[in-house]
Amino acid sequence: MGNRCCKKNNDLPSDRPLMIQGKKVEANFGPAPGIMNGVGHTGPGDSRYTPDPYRGQIRGAQAGADIIRTRNLTQHQSVTKKRIVIGLYNYDAREQSDISFCKGDRMEVLDDSEPDWWRVMNLRTKQQGLIPWNFVAEERSVESEDWFFDNISRKEADKLLLSDDNPRGTFLVTPSEHNPHGYSLSVKDWEEQRGYHVKHYKIKPLDNGGFYIATNQTFPSLPALVLAYTNEEVIEKTTKFKITRLIRPCRKQKPRMFNLSVESSQENYEIPFVDITINKRIGKGNFGQVHEAMYKKEIKVAVKELIKEDVKSMTDFKQEVEIMKHIHHDRLLALFGISTYGDKLFIITEFMENGALLNYLRRTDVEFKRLDLLKFCEQVASGMLYLEGMNCIHRDLAARNVLVDNLCSVKICDFRHTRSIQDDIYESKSQVCAIKWTAPEALEYRRYSHKSDVWSYGILMYEIFTLGKAVYTGIKNRDLVEQLKNGFRMSKPDLATNDIYDLMMRCWKWDSSLRPSFKEIVEIMKNKTWNGYLSNDTDVEADVDENDALLDEH
């Protein structure tokens, strides 16, 4: 079922000039009318774009964080009006029920009732079948543009752009981390003294729906602005600074997916062991060895090994698998399936290139800005909010149980002790917790709740803002509860600001009812990110003269 039509199309961005529906778009030179300052659009905007309902929420990044799950084939015709999507990548069908398509193909959505696989008709080939939802975007939406990257940080943008494959002038556009209606333009540049580096420019919105970088040049839409800065003549007319000419969009990585049969039910997670190629050992997990492996020789996965005769581990193993089957979120490690070989069982998950967050924080070859640390906290809180909504408590939240991918985004893992609860409190029959991460009511009475997870989250925040230092140093496990009861709390980490430390202290309230909810924590974290909370950080957009939109460079 090869995608023969796409053999000449390798998903590399074109070096041809960017066009908008085949029309040349002129810049509007003159003072910017109705400059927005963090408020909503008051004009109609560009009708070419539809609003993005997911803006500001954590959804799988197009840079490669999405997971394709097995879909249930029960049909529910939820699409009520004709809807066209555009292929963002080439896709080769692997089963009878899915179809191949090329990057740029237009497809009509026939059924989008399932979250991961949509039924479409390819308007070029006239074929009907299933496609992965995260390989397409709405026609005429900003997400359909080659240069638009959603949900990636400045650090991730730098890493992508500074790839040796990218020439000077390679660029991408991301949503602003501080203005919910603005964007950031990131461009690879070169200077003799500095070599290759990345420049970031603030794209600010206008009240009438337009955008600008320099106040003497405004544009009716975001693609019009991007197109204009591929033109040297337009760049020459900017004032006070010269924007690096845009040559080609940065290449997007295909979203991650696994090749379970789309015809199977969602409960079928069995993977034939013959489809797994075990490579190097990458660590030791709670059940046994952990290996890097390949699924069907094309998808990198992590494989955790278990000996069947280990009864206690087998119980935990089954518990973790059952939980992972029913929790699906971008900030939780995805289960691909389980497999057996001889007397061994294997749990197969997505592969996270940078390993455990605890070890990653301790690396001396990685430089962290405060915003990086805040992003880790925000992403973990988002995953915990999802678990809370699913009536699940994790019970073992810690930096060692958070993994980091190749773009430095994090996901919660290790669901051995996770439990689904019907009431607000779960009373455990056994003491299986990591003492220094566990809330006092759980230590004393084995009573777990979402608020005991919040306590653990506060400890995780401490680990993050100390770059992985040990917690409660000098205090023995048997003395910890008494110390906490007497009011002892860990001191403020050097990298934490006062308000971040205040949040930690709220998480460590003795009375669990006084601790914040994960919903509140997520809102706090997002508010700090959007509002430029770390304005004195060298990796954060700073307020500059409005004629000088160049952000800090690295």
Image: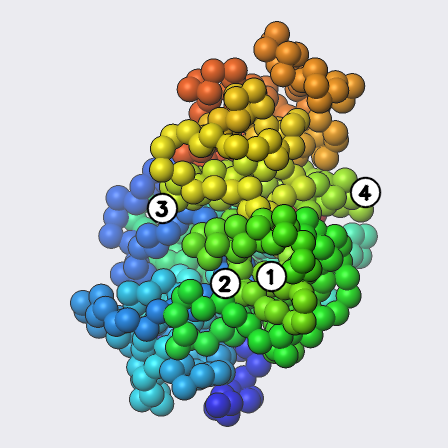
Please identify, in this view, whether the residue under mark 3 or under mark 4 is nearer the observer.
4
Going 67% across and 58% down the picture, which residue do you hit? 309
Dot 3: within a 10 Å radius of its alpha carbon, few (fewer than 14), some, or many (20 or more) residues?
Answer: many
The label shown at residue 364 is 4
Residue type at tag 2: Ile
Front of the two marks 2 and 1: 1
Res. 99 image quadrant: bottom left
- Picture coordinates of residue 292 (x, y %)? 71, 64
| Image coords of residue 36 (percent x, y) | 37, 40
According to the picture, the residue beneath numbered tag 1 turns out to be 347
Relative to 508, residue 54 above or below: below
| Horizontal side, residue 400 vs residue 397: left or right | right
Q: CA distance from mark 2 to mark 1?
A: 16 Å
User: Is residue 129 or residue 286 the one in the foreground?
Assistant: 286
Q: Residue at x 38, y 30 (%)?
A: 424
Q: Quadrant location of residue 189?
A: bottom right
| Residue 98, image quadrant | bottom left
Q: Please name the amino acid that badge 3 sits on.
A: Leu
Real-space CA distance between mark 3 and mark 1, rounded to the nearest whole angstrom: 51 Å
User: Callout 4: helix, strand or loop?
Assistant: loop
Viewer-closest of 436 and 14 = 436
Report the amino acid beneath label 4: Thr
Comparing 3 with 471, the one in front is: 471
* Label 4: how many Cα within 10 Å (few below 14, some 14–19, many 20+): few
Give the answer, above or below, for where 480 lies relative to 65.
above
Label whose residue precedes the other's in the sequence (3 or 4): 3
Identity, as a three-letter code, of the amino acid under mark 1: Ile
